[in-house]
């Protein structure tokens, strides 16, 4: 399930990792503009960095 699908399903908060914080991306910025989206730098060299969780009450599964 993609970020937009989670938002459309009513997730109160979705975490969105950015693997290239130096690079501007219109699609990423559009998602990040939603107040329910929490962005964070995603370190692709750290294996634990790719495991994020949503607070979607209907489907609490790992995203990464």
Image (cartoon, helix red, strand yellow):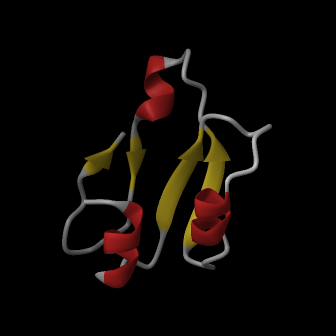
**Point 68% across, 35% down: residue:** 20
Residue 36 appears in the picture as rendered? yes
User: Residue 36: percent from the left, percent from the top?
Assistant: 55, 76
| Above or below, 18 relative to 15 | above
Quarter occupied by residue 54: bottom left
Work out which residue is located at the far top of the displayed protein and give it.
45
One can see residue 10 in this view: no
Q: Is residue 38 left or right of residue 50?
A: right
Between 23 and 14, the one nearer to me in the picture: 23
Between 12 and 32, the residue placed more toward the observer is: 32
Query: Picture coordinates of residue 7 (x, y %)?
Result: 40, 77
Q: In which quarter of the image is residue 6?
A: bottom left
Quadrant of the frame with the N terminus: bottom left
* Residue at (31, 72) in percent of width and height: 5
Q: In this view, does 33 lie above or below 19?
A: below
The percent coordinates of residue 51 (x first, y second) are 40, 36
| Residue drawn at the location 19% of the way across and 74% of the way down | 58
- Please, is residue 16 above or below residue 5 in the view? above
> Residue 61: x percent and y percent?
23, 53
Q: How many marks on residues?
A: 0
Foreground of the two, 59 or 45? 45
Q: Residue at x 48, y 71 (%)?
A: 13
Quarter placement of the C terminus: top left
State the residue lying farthest toward the front. Answer: 26
- Residue most extreme to the left: 58
């Amino acid at each position: 399930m993609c970020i937009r699908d989670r938002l459309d399903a009513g997730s109160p908060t979705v975490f969105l990792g950015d693997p290239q914080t130096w690079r501007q991306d219109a699609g990423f910025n559009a998602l990040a503009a939603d107040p329910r989206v929490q962005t964070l730098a995603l370190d692709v060299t750290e294996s634990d960095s790719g495991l994020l969780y949503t607070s979607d009450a209907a489907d609490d599964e790992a995203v990464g």
